[in-house]
Image (tube, grey):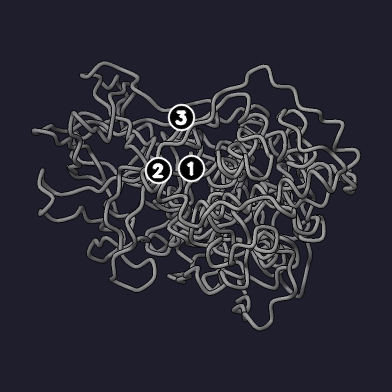
């Protein structure tokens, strides 16, 4: 799909899902009904607010309110998502799972295809996975029905009423605590084992990673306005030390020792992508020797457009494409598939593939309320921080790219490039978790802006989430729309490489900028800012009272004096003279774009021309060709691009 590194027909259910989803304890782990414990009313959220619902449920089931709040924060950041299910079938602030009910609630839309290997020398094969069938779902470990039994609240109430949902989560936590033979203590430190079991994880590493995140939230505290406008707060307990020894008595399987490349603070498992030869072809990645042979410059963020089990089935198919890691929405479990030294086929651009690591996240671009969980965001951020430190990858939006920021390698490929993770991925929150938050970084006249809308309040209209042309539900977004003039009634900015008129479609990135991206200021007008974008002046609303961008400064490129315009490239390949006789020279093909004289674009990196030659199964013929030509990576439109250093001057933005 345009929104995924995975095949356009990947469906929301993927293939059959075999384990519990939703980050909550399996039904078999829970005690029967808790007896006389009172249940909060299904109208509690309306009469007392969500904060009061947490207090009421905590008192009713003798769970520390702080533990209940912290678990819910990791599940949903206290959002209700208007009763819509997550990608793994979870509902409400506590993410209680009911996947059979949820299966048909998540929309899926295939749109376009892409050769994820991104190398015209040998397109990757892409089989179509089956569409899920609700009648074929296997029995699942689901927590919402169990919570209904524990509380006496009907399942429909647990799905749609936040107070009832919180009560269900409290009952599940209390039952897990009693199952472990622990008292219903008022001390949050005594609940580590129950929190670990609440994750639904089958192994100690995954359960511990989840519980550690919950206790990190307890220590740091949190406060935010939820998606239905309620303020919820959790006071910080910086000195809180959990009784982690409880995990030994939780009856979980030990973590596997499998040589994965992951930080110690996350749960990681090895699910290898096959490197196999079949007929005259092979798949589904290439052997390499990174970073010794070539540097790793990028991490590419994807969403799966499919559910966990179906996605893992695909990665095991040698005739399919590959990526390095997948992260599960339920609990943040990471599966590694391709070692960092090798080159996965994930980005649709061979140059970027050879210079990057691809991370898939379980989710759907066009279903903002089939939400990315806080557990997944945090696990992903830890992985990215680890990879950044290990391979020297800068933590900025020039090097941490969405798949939607990867350029087409040639003019013909531009229309088919993917658009995930899309406008609903929360880049602002993600970079806060990376410990590299965006903010003002220069004087007002620094010459650049960093795109930085308030995610929750920034709600541009998108269409096509469920029905082509129909508006998507109002929702927070990381992206800001661009116009041809300082007027929302003016035409949207057009991307000539797409060959179509711009739209507000959720997959149409032609007239959008994304949080963290930086652009050179071209003009200003009464609450509007213009930037240089795709070779033209593009305007966006940027009112002083509610800015969507902040001042920045840095380096920019501009065409050399005397040149009326310069070409733009989708890959930084060496000059012809750099290739040895046994490696075919690759064309240095410009994209259908130019940079006219006088325009300025932000420099993201300086790179030598480089090509990784790998078209055979045996790795002995693989070569890295490095040229004398230098390139600058720039932020050109929604996607990055490259210009030859010989064509440009570099200067301070101010």
Q: Are marks 1 and 2 in contact (CB under 8 Å)?
A: yes
Helix, strand or loop at mark 3: strand
Q: Quadrant of residue 99?
A: bottom right
Tag on residue 640? 2
Disc with the residue nearer the chain's start (3 vs 1): 1
Q: Residue at x 53, y 63 (%)?
A: 157
Placement of 375 over or under 127, stated as above or below: above
Residue at mark 1: 401
Placement of 608 over or under 256, stated as above or below: above
**Residue 45 image offset from top left, x and y in percent:** 45, 49
Placement of 435 over or under 170, stated as above or below: above
**Residue 611 image offset from top left, x and y in percent:** 57, 45
**Residue 205 image offset from top left, x and y in percent:** 81, 41
Give the Cα distance between marks 3 and 1. 16 Å
Q: Could you tell whether 518 is left or right of 84 in the image?
A: left
Label 1 crowd (10 A; few <14 / some 14-19 / many >=20): many
- Give whichever of 468, 546 is nearer the camera: 546
Q: Is residue 582 visible?
A: no
Residue at mark 3: 606
Q: Which label sits in the foreground, 3 or 2?
A: 2
Label 2 crowd (10 A; few <14 / some 14-19 / many >=20): many
């Amino acid at each position: 799909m345009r929104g995924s590194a995975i095949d356009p027909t990947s469906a929301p259910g993927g293939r059959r899902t075999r384990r519990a989803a939703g980050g909550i304890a399996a039904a078999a782990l829970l005690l029967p009904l808790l007896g006389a414990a009172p249940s909060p009313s299904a109208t509690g959220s309306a009469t007392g607010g969500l904060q009061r619902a947490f207090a009421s449920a905590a008192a009713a089931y003798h769970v520390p309110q702080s533990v209940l709040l912290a678990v819910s924060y990791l599940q949903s950041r206290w959002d209700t998502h208007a009763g819509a299910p997550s990608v793994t079938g979870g509902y409400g602030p506590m993410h209680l799972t009911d996947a059979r009910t949820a299966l048909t609630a998540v929309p899926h839309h295939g749109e376009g295809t892409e050769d994820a290997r991104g190398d015209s020398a040998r397109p990757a094969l892409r089989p179509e996975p089956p569409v899920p069938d609700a009648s074929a779902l296997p029995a699942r470990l689901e927590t919402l029905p169990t919570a209904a039994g524990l509380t006496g609240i009907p399942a429909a109430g647990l799905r749609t009423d936040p107070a009832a949902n919180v009560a269900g989560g409290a009952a599940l936590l209390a039952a897990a605590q009693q199952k472990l033979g622990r008292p219903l203590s008022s001390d949050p430190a005594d609940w580590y084992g129950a929190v670990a079991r609440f994750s639904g994880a089958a192994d100690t590493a995954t359960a511990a990673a989840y519980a550690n995140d919950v206790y990190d939230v307890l220590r740091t505290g949190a406060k935010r306005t939820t998606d239905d406008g309620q303020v919820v707060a959790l006071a910080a307990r910086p000195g809180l030390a959990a009784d982690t020894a409880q995990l030994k008595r939780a009856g979980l399987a030990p973590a596997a020792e499998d040589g994965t490349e992951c930080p110690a603070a996350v749960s990681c498992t090895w699910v290898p992508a096959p490197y196999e030869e079949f007929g005259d072809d092979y798949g589904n990645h290439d052997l390499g020797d990174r970073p010794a042979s070539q540097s790793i410059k990028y991490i590419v963020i994807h969403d799966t457009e499919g559910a966990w089990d179906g996605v893992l089935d695909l990665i095991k198919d040698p005739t399919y494409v590959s990526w390095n890691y997948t992260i599960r929405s339920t609990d943040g479990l990471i599966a590694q598939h391709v070692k960092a030294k090798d080159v996965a086929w994930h980005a649709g651009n061979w140059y970027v593939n050879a210079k990057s690591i691809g991370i898939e996240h379980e989710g759907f671009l066009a279903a903002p309320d089939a939400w990315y969980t806080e557990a997944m965001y945090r696990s992903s951020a830890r992985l990215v921080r680890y990879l950044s430190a290990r391979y020297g990858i800068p933590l900025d939006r020039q090097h941490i790219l969405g798949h939607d920021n990867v350029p087409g390698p040639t003019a013909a490929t531009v229309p088919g490039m993917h658009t995930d993770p899309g406008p609903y991925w929360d880049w602002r929150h993600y970079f806060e978790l990376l410990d590299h938050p965006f903010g003002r970084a220069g004087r007002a006249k620094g010459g650049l802006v960093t795109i930085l809308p308030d995610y929750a309040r920034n709600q541009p209209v998108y269409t096509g989430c469920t029905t082509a042309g129909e508006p998507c539900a109002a929702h927070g977004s990381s992206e800001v729309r661009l116009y041809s003039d300082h007027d929302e009634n003016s035409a949207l900015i057009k991307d000539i490489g797409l060959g179509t008129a711009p739209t507000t479609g959720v997959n149409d990135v032609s007239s959008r900028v994304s949080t963290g991206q930086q652009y050179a200021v071209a003009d200003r007008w009464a609450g509007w800012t213009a930037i240089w974008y795709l070779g033209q002046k593009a305007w966006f609303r940027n009112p002083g009272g509610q800015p969507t961008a902040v001042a920045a400064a840095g380096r920019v490129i501009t065409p050399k004096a005397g040149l009326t315009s310069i070409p733009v490239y989708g890959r930084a390949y060496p000059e012809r003279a750099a290739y040895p006789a046994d490696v075919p020279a690759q064309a240095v093909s410009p994209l259908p774009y130019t940079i006219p004289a006088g325009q300025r674009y932000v420099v993201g990196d300086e790179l030598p021309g480089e090509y990784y030659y790998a078209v055979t199964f045996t790795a002995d013929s693989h070569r890295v060709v490095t040229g004398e030509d230098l390139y600058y990576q720039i932020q050109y439109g929604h996607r990055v691009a490259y210009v030859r250093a010989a064509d440009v001057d570099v200067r301070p933005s101010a």
